[in-house]
Amino acid sequence: MMDGQTFIKRFETYCPQWLAEPGDPVGLHVGTLNKPIERVMMALDVRPEIVAEAIDKDIDLIVVKHPPIFRPLVRLSSDDPQAKMMMDLVKHDIAVYAAHTNMDIIDDGLNDWFCEALGIKTETFLHQTHQVKMKKLAVFVPIEQASHIRTVLAQAGAGQQGAYKNTSYSLIGTGRFTPETSAHPAIGTTGKEAQVQEAKIEVIFPETITETVVSAMIAAHPYEEPAYDLYTLDNLSKTYGIGRVGELPAPITVDTLIDRIKQAFGLDQLRVITPPQAKNDLQRIAICGGSGQSFYTDALKAKADVYITGDVTYHIAHDMQANDLIGIDPGHHIEALCISRFIELFNQWKIEEGWNITFVPATTSTNPFQYK
């Protein structure tokens, strides 16, 4: 039976915690991951109704978009619905793990899925949040083990360059060493100089996985003391950002875009901010799930025709109008798209990893708003 740590380790290779915005309380919120898990639920929110559904479905772990403890709990009394919800989770040994802004920022994440749903070809992010330096590892290994070490490095995440994976460079040369009396050499004899035909393998990777890559290499290396070099590269870096900017295949009207958004996200109504000098044809679109009104100036810089985001306030709407930026507010709950998309990913990982585990989408709606 698989434990929670194993599953979350795989999840965090896709959606790492370090990509979350500063102060965002991502990670484990309730319970423990040091336990066997058989049933995992994916949800947008943790609300009393979701907890009841999880209890009814014998869930061991809930993975959620919105952290349930976003602000500190003052009291833990069952008279308070929020506190009772937490107590029910603990009572039934249901762990809760949250991925919030990191889910928005990752490549092929929630904002990219919004663009797919609306037929927008993504060009870039809306607002930069992270810049990650790249490192290079050069390791020397006997030629016979070179292929194995390259495989290990790739499995640890090294060698990803743009749209290419498993990239590396090898150079053949001669390694020389003399084992001392305290050594336990894999090759050679104590006190005698040895010469070995070695491959120098070079790979690059983001600095965020340095420990993982180096540890994997050392564990797989045949030598007692592997020789390797580690560099920080000044000519390469990887940038990440929240929101997305892209273009539709052809210009469309505001009404057509509104209908497309309603259909894509199952909405009856949405709010539209229309400037006096609104454009008739829209093609360049900026989008940010959740409460993204603070990034409307980035949408202006990106020369977007329209900005799609949730929870736009009265005064920000006026500012968008004044800057001739069309705004469409479909609400916060469209982020529920993450449920079906992550269930697809989880089941894909299940096949790849050979897991004996069941993934369950939350079916209870947590949208607090109705339009009448």
Image (tube, grey):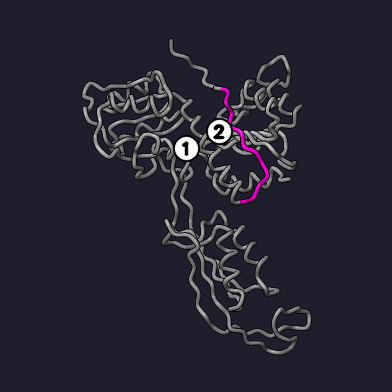
Left or right, 297 with reference to 13: left
- Circle 1 residues within 10 Å: few <14, some 14–19, many ≥20: many
Q: Residue furthest top?
A: 372
Residue 29 versus residue 165: which sits nearer the camera?
165
Quadrant of residue 299 in the image? top left
268 in relation to 147, above or below: above
Residue at the image point whose x is 45% and y is 53% from the top: 238
| Visible residue check, residue 145 | yes
Residue 60 is one of the magenta-drawn residues: no
Q: Sequence-wise, which precedes: disc 2 or disc 1? A: 2
Magenta range = 353-364
Q: How many marks?
A: 2
Query: Which residue type carries mark 2?
Result: Lys
Residue 349 versus residue 290: which sits nearer the camera?
349
Label 1 element class: helix
Residue at which label 2 appears = 65
Q: Position of residue 239 (x, y in %)?
A: 43, 49
Quadrant of residue 44 in the image? top right
Q: Which mark is residue 110?
A: 1
Label 2 element class: loop
Q: Position of residue 8 (x, y in %)?
A: 64, 44
Image quarter hosting the C terminus: top left
Q: Which mark is residue 69?
A: none
Residue at the image point whose x is 60% and y is 64% from the top: 152
Does the residue at mark 2 contact the one at mark 1 (Cβ under 8 Å)? yes
